[in-house]
């Protein structure tokens, strides 16, 4: 694991982070254009499935870069082990903080006239169950591996502050959701990223965050009562 960056290592890690953001922007743009131009030709299930395949390709590119160029593990921080009680308590507290944060954000955005309903989410609620589950699994695992597991520890190599890596990765995570078309669909993921990021930095356990992410997305696509993103 890289702890003190040499010049070559510095460049390799930095280039990987920059490429990750550029590829994310490309993935978002391609998915949006694909959805627009195939809306009358393909069902939403097919379009969503293809977009998830794009995202798996995006993750594969990051993974290959880490293995081939960085020559190290995707997760720089070793996983800490905890008991079942800690997992349960962490999940409950994380979800509670996310719900409160999203509610506050909704109130603020509404007061500013920026709280608008995404046109994409209502359509996604009518997708077939297997496609929904694919989306949930893709987001729950890959987004946590990319934005918390991969990005945060590497950003930490460049900053003395423990806050900047969390803030930067959370903003990038929020921008991933810009395709939903509303401010709230970016702000809420940023809040989620901050909550998840501080927990990951403190406790170094990606599995807890994956569980939380899966539960949030299960709610969003099956019983949309809590947080949509």
Image: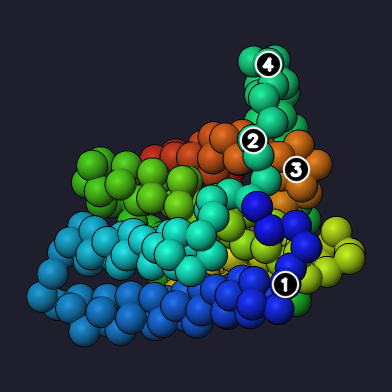
Marking on residue 83? 4
CA separation, marks 3 and 1?
A: 29 Å
Q: Is residue 9 left or right of residue 219?
A: right
CA separation, marks 2 and 4?
A: 13 Å
The residue tagged 3 is: 199
The numbered mark, 1 or 2, whose residue comes first in the sequence reads 1
Q: Secondary structure at mark 2?
A: loop
Does the CB distance between marks 4 and 1 fall below 8 Å?
Answer: no
The residue positioned farthest toward the left in the image shown: 41
Q: Secondary structure at mark 4?
A: loop
The numbered mark, 4 or 1, whose residue comes first in the sequence reads 1
The numbered mark, 3 or 1, whose residue comes first in the sequence reads 1
- Picture residue at 45% right of the left edge, 52% below the top: 142
The 10 Å Cα crowd at callout 3, few under 14, some 14 to 19, many 20 or more, is some
Percent coordinates x, y for residue 108 in the rendering:
78, 66
Percent coordinates x, y for residue 120 in the rendering:
38, 66
The residue tagged 2 is: 79
Is label 3 or label 1 in front? 1
Q: Is residue 109 visible?
A: no
Marking on residue 6? 1
Is label 2 or label 4 in front? 2
- Picture residue at 71% right of the left edge, 78% below the top: 7
Is label 4 or label 1 in front? 1
- Picture residue at 68% right of the left edge, 75% below the top: 10
Percent coordinates x, y for residue 198 in the rendering:
78, 49
């Amino acid at each position: 694991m890289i702890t003190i960056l040499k010049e070559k290592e510095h460049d390799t890690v930095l280039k990987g982070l920059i490429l990750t953001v550029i590829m994310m922007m490309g993935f978002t743009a391609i998915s949006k254009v694909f959805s627009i131009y195939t809306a009358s030709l393909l069902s939403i299930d097919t379009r969503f499935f293809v977009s998830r395949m794009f995202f798996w390709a995006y993750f594969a590119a990051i993974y290959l870069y880490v293995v081939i160029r960085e020559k190290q593990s995707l997760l720089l921080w070793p996983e800490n082990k905890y008991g079942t009680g800690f997992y349960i308590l962490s999940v409950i507290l994380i979800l509670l903080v996310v719900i409160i944060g999203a509610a506050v954000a909704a109130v603020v955005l509404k007061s500013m006239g920026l709280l608008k309903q995404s046109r994409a989410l209502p359509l996604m609620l009518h997708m077939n169950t297997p496609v929904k589950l694919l989306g949930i699994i893709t987001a729950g695992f890959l987004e946590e591996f990319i934005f918390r597991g991969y990005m945060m520890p590497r950003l930490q190599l460049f900053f003395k502050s423990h806050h900047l890596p969390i803030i930067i990765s959370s903003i990038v995570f929020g921008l991933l959701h810009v395709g939903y078309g509303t401010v709230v669909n970016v702000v809420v993921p940023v809040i989620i990223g901050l909550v998840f990021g501080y927990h990951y930095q403190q406790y170094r356990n990606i599995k807890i965050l994956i569980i939380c992410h899966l539960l949030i997305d299960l709610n969003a696509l099956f019983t949309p009562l809590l947080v949509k993103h």
